[in-house]
Amino acid sequence: MLKDKKTLISLSLLLFILILPRILVYPALGNGMVPTDAEGRYFPQAEELSKSFGMFFSITGPFYSAFLLLFQKLSGNMIVGPVITQHILGIMAALLVFFYFRKVNLSLAFIVTVFVYSSVLVLWNEHSILREALAGFFLVLWVVVLFLAVRETKYLRFVFGLLTAFIGIILVFIRIEFLVLFFLMPLVLVVGRKMQHQDFSFKDKPFLRWTGGYACLLVVFIGVYLVVPGQLQVKQNYGNLFSIAWHALQPEVFYYDNSRYPELLEAYQKVLESEEGYLQIDEAHHTVFKMQPFNDATIEYLSVHPEISLSWTQMMDRMYIDMMTHNTVAYLKSYATNVQNHLLGEGENIRFTGVFNKVLDTRTSGVPIVNSMLKGLTVGLDWLYDALQSLAFLWLFVVALLFAGFRRKKLPAEVVTALIVSVVHILVLAFLSNAAHRFRSAIDPFLYFAQIYLIYIFLRAVFTRPVARVLARLPSNRHDV
């Protein structure tokens, strides 16, 4: 593999591009950043775990809190060590992505890897006490390990089924929204395997062994939440499932007739229409929210109606279901809008790029080469993000995806696997959250590669066939002898 000159040159250049910004981020942003999530959730959770590790199954994102606790025990510091580790894992994830896609298209694998893992968003996530960096690494590792079994029969073993399930459980313990992919991953294997090996059968003993390994840990995972008391109601800072999910709603969903709770619905509408209306749509059609006014309105409603024996989070769940069932068309439109917004990304990259380079500019002014590189990178990234976050790119991808559906047997299994993982996760995110880009950043390398690759083969088919036909009709230069 490394004897291939092109791969070796690409790898050397890739390492340089990956390592340099992770060095520059320290003079720009210090030893690490502690956003509100860390102070409000992860540090307190790590403290709870230090007192009783039995709390592991009853907190949000327990693996990340345990990750922080490990460094607290080793060094007494939950910022420096985790941030360094997150940067290292970012480089490892980038290399895994590069080698995963390099056989499909070496140049595109290089471009996508550089674009994703040198972006300010990824650097920002890695340099912060946030779950995204770990989620990104383990998702890439998960897909790569799964694809070993897709590609070669020798990896269809019980132990690799166990390993795949184990990585999936880690991901679920980092971010609960990976639960859907965790249950569907064997199906992803089946689809990829069928595309790679036409004679594949569900009765194949190697496949049954892999499935047995995966199922063993799956049963254990489900058993924990059924057997351990109280674990089906995981404590969360933001309430129950639907209390989280309705962060993704558009305002139109709040306006309808025949609600089972008209007084509460009216209270929500007043919040929307007030000067402090928190749930609104910005210029790019992305939801902006803060839930406290809605929480307060729900608590006040329950105080007036003591006959409703529900907590305020349970009442919000009821309201969410009420909106889904009594305003279904608006709800589905809202969901479709959120799917589109997640596919486009919110553009946090552009916002962060300016902040990041503005700080670096003053600290690297004595190094003209670095300054010029940063400014050029900023301009280039802004242009790229504008293109990738445009509706034109989205609809071109949709057309290319439909075109690829007719040629699915010719698609590389790497691309199909990446596409399935990306689409499933986007559909889950669109239900659970607003379109903040960091929530989907874990799938960015797979989504971008699949999008660009499918668009490439579509455009090649569109433009090369007419040219070939024209060339075929041209008179031949050959003369009969």
Image: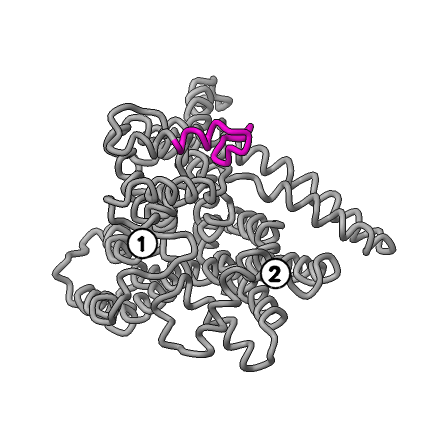
Seen at 26% across and 29% down, the residue is 259
Which residue occupies the extreme left position in the image?
A: 203
Element under disc 1: helix
Q: Where is residue 401 in the image (x, y as percent from the top left)?
A: 36, 34
Q: Where is residue 100 in the image (x, y as percent from the top left)?
A: 44, 57
Give amino acid for label 2. Val
**In which quadrant of the rendered view does residue 26 lie?**
bottom right
**In which quadrant of the rendered view does residue 408 lie?**
top left
Distance from the alpha carbon under mark 2 to that under mark 1 = 29 Å
Give the side of residue 358 with respect to residue 388, left or right. Answer: right
Within 10 Å of disc 1 (Cα), the crowding (few <14, some 14-19, many 20+) is many
Above or below, 464 against 114 in this view is: above
Give amino acid for label 1. Leu
How did the renderer colour the structure?
A: one colour
Residue at the spot of label 2: 34
Front in this rendered view, residue 11 or 402:
402
Above or below, 160 against 409 in this view is: below
Q: Where is residue 316 in the image (x, y as percent from the top left)?
A: 33, 43
Seen at 27% across and 56% down, the residue is 189
In magenta segment, residue 366:
no
Q: Can residue 216 be seen in this view?
A: no
Give the side of residue 341 with respect to residue 283, left or right. Answer: left
Looking at the rendering, the stretch of residues picked out in magenta corresponds to 267-284
Residue at the spot of label 1: 181
For marks 2 and 1 on the same chain, the one whose residue lies earlier in the sequence? 2
Seen at 69% across and 45% down, the residue is 377
Seen at 73% across and 43% down, the residue is 376
